[in-house]
Image: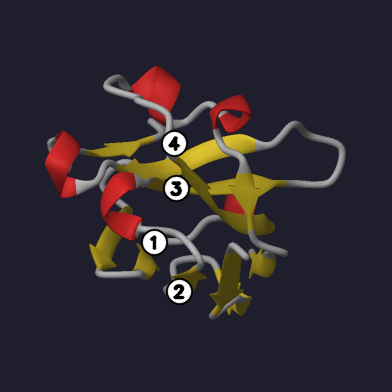
Amino acid sequence: QVQLVESGGGSVQAGGSLRLSCAASGINYQNYNMAWFRQAPGKEREGVAAIEPRNRGGTTYYANSVKGRFTMSQENAKITLEMDSLKPEDTALYYCAASNDFTGTAYRALLPSLYGFWGQGTQVTVSS
């Protein structure tokens, strides 16, 4: 049984930082792309960051809106998203996701429809 469990969300003022973590179980993480998505009320789910497994190149991809502010990393089955210089528009429910489909481009790596396994989400709220 695949489980993705997020933690680390919370409330912070603009300019602050948060760290999200995702613990994956039930999958061979060495063969899966891992990603972070977010969804704000009334908006579509959007890709934030994704990382390919090392045996597929290990490339990390970021949405333009978070480049230079967010950093995704992976240590075995644990995924981390370091979020700095947070803005009110970063407020959303953040999800961890896993896919064994080939990505290879930022567009595909951040495409929600490629991901078949999802966590329950963790709320991030940034106040101005």
Mark positioned earlier in the residue sequence (2 or 3): 2
Q: Name the residue under label 2.
A: 21
Q: Which of 54 and 67 is in front in this view?
A: 54
> Real-space Cα distance between discs 1 and 2?
18 Å
Q: Name the residue under label 3.
A: 35
Mark positioned earlier in the residue sequence (2 or 4): 2
Label at residue 15:
none
Which amino acid is tagged 4? Ser
> Real-space Cα distance between discs 3 and 4?
15 Å
* Callout 2 crowding tier (Cα within 10 Å): few <14, some 14–19, many ≥20: many
Q: What element carries label 3?
A: strand
> Real-space Cα distance between discs 2 and 4?
20 Å
Q: In this view, does 7 lie to the left or right of 59?
A: right
Which amino acid is tagged 1? Ser
Q: Is mark 4 on a helix, strand or loop?
A: loop
Q: In this view, does 8 lie to the left or right of 21?
A: right
Mark positioned earlier in the residue sequence (1 or 4): 4
